[in-house]
Image: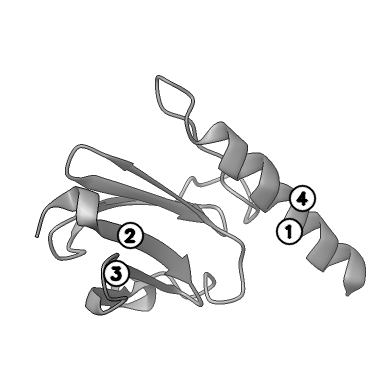
Amino acid sequence: MKQNNVLFILSNGRVAAINKKDGAIIWEVKLKQYGVNSMSQSVGQLMVEDNKIYAGCAGILLCLDTKDGALIWKNELKGWGFGFVSMANVNNEAAGASVKAAAANAAVIAAT
């Protein structure tokens, strides 16, 4: 399937590829299979570039393959804490999403 017909989502500790035409799940991965246990209740962010998905939250950054969600690499960002991971690419397209996600995360923290 062409990548422009796919929507990638991060929710409840999972990353999935969704068919934009009918909403069907093409593939999904549970991030705990990659040793990431704290992401299920965290606000996260995805960025897609070429054939890679960059997923960040709970102080961890993952790089996954767009075709099947296979792990390419993982960086636990040791010493950086466990908060929201804000990302931007060269064109800074992810900046707007990170601002919204950070605001949502702050609202969740304030409500608890």
- The disc labelled 3 sits on which kind of residue? Ile
- Write the residue at 61% across / 62% down: 43
Please provide percent x and percent y for residue 19.
25, 68
Q: Describe residue 75's horizontal placement relative to residue 107 as left or right.
A: left
| Kind of element beneath mark 2 | strand
In the rendered image, which quarter contains the C terminus?
bottom right
Between 74 and 19, the one lying in front of the other is: 19
- Asked whether the viewer can see residue 30, the reply is yes
Label 2: which residue? Answer: 7
Residue closest to the far front = 21
Q: Describe residue 92's horizontal placement relative to residue 2 as left or right.
A: right
Q: Which mark is residue 57?
A: none
| Kind of element beneath mark 3 | strand
Contact flag, marks 4 and 1 (Cβ < 8 Å): yes
Disc 2 packing (10 Å; few <14; some 14–19; many ≥20): some
Q: Which mark is residue 18?
A: 3
Q: Which mark is residue 105?
A: 1
Label 4: which residue? Answer: 103
| Kind of element beneath mark 1 | helix
Q: Nearer the viewer, mark 1 or mark 3?
A: 3
Position of 71 relative to 50 (above/below): below
Disc 4 packing (10 Å; few <14; some 14–19; many ≥20): few
- Asked whether the viewer can see residue 75, the reply is no
Q: Nearer the viewer, mark 3 or mark 4?
A: 3
In the rendered image, which quarter contains the N terminus?
bottom left
Contact flag, marks 3 and 4 (Cβ < 8 Å): no
- The disc labelled 1 sits on which kind of residue? Asn
